[in-house]
Amino acid sequence: MIRFLTAGESHGQGLVVIVEGMPAGLSISEEYIGTEMARRQRGHGRGGRMQIEKDWAHVVSGIRHGRTLGSPIAMTIENRDWVNWTTVMSVNPVEEEVERVTRIRPGHADLPGTMKYGYDDVRDVLERSSARETAARVAAGAVARRLLEEFGMEIRSHSLIIGGVRAEVNGDVDWERVEASSVRCADPEAEPRMVDAIDSAKEAGDTVGGVVEVIVYGVPIGLGSHVQWDRKLDGRIAQALMSINATKAVSIGDGWDSVNYRGSQVHDVIDPVTDPDRPWQRQTNRSGGTEGGMTSGMPLVARFAIKPISTLVKPLPSVDLDTGELVQAHYERSDVCQVPPAGVIGEAMVALVVADAFMEKFGGDNVSETRRNYAAYLETVRPRKWGTGVSAD
């Protein structure tokens, strides 16, 4: 129902994103999208590129007078650094010789990309495989987030681990603190140690990774489906998060830890229903808000692991694309740690998946129609004695 496409290279003229499937009548503005774009640019461990770019998604189509039209939403994001790359990244042939990149970076898309597409210049791969592309994802995700907000859903994220430093978070997360934190950490004791881990890696010419948690509150029961493998919502979320640059693992709820316990310690016991407006509550949420590929009505929780960035100031040994001989890997300006911005990117990707599943379930060419469909469905998910005229006997 909702899909998006991005285009653009890291040092090209800019990025383009098209979002299709949004219902008409949704209130949204460039300023709203810009707030999400700015969140992605913050975070301790970001490189010099963030001092150059001031990301703003310019809406080209699909929105009129602050409301969606139901037609595809097109946005462009300018690369301010383009002025320094007009020759290297020129669309048209250039007369002067442009230095090729032939020193392959271990851990990046460089080698498989050049082999797959038959390039003789690694830049033809690294420009598109760069995490710069995620700015377009965040713009698309902002549109999806706005739709979910219209139906009472809220998306948050925070850093659980950076550079081996683990945050201890028990109970409710202080989201204001997370947004104010340079590493998006809810634990005031872990935060300075995370900063130190990033600084230490920077001094060593190295990089660090970590783990991010994304939570969606207010998700209704029944999004996704158990009937086919590709309709399972947790599978769709895992694929979306896995597609983020440097992601190497995804967990739904306590997935990674649950293998260490018995079933009686893992599954979420269902409470008796005492409030018809809040049915099917659980004593715990270890499953992360999904069962059988569908949402359970509890908060949706996904965690994903970001490996250390593969571009190092002190490069690893590698080989040259032309000669196959030993060289130091290419260095392209990069971050030391991408974990804080990865949380914002993760929010965007989860928002897009949940919004897609929501529209798949409730449809509607405009927001009012979707709202009617949603309200009618909520009446059907109560226990029978509080339902729509169906006998409890």
Image (cartoon, rainbow, N blue to C red):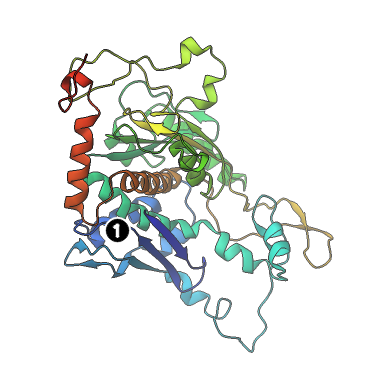
Q: Position of residue 147 (x, y in %)?
A: 26, 50
Dividing the picture into quadrants, the one containing residue 52 is: bottom left
Q: Along the horizontal axis of the image, is 224 left or right of 115?
A: left
Q: Is residue 99 above or below residue 204?
A: below
Residue 319 appears left or right of 124: right
Left/right of residue 380 with respect to residue 248 in the rendered view = left
Q: Pointer 1: what residue?
A: 34
- Rendered position, 94 above or below 238: below
Q: Residue at x 22, y 21 (%)?
A: 384
* Residue 182: quarter of image: top left
| Residue at (28, 54) in percent of width and height | 35
Q: Position of residue 351 (x, y in %)?
A: 36, 46
Q: Residues within 10 Å of mark 1 (few under 14, many from 20)?
A: some
Q: Position of residue 190 (x, y in %)?
A: 43, 28
Secondary structure, mark 1, is helix
Q: Residue at horizontal 50%, vertical 72%?
A: 12
Please state which of residues 202 and 226 is positioned toward the viewer in this rendering: 226
Q: Where the C terminus falls, by quadrant? A: top left
> Relative to 393, is 18 above or below?
below
Number of dots carrying numbers: 1
- Residue 335 visible, this angle: yes
Viewer-proximal residue among 355 and 112: 355
Residue type at mark 1: give it. Gly
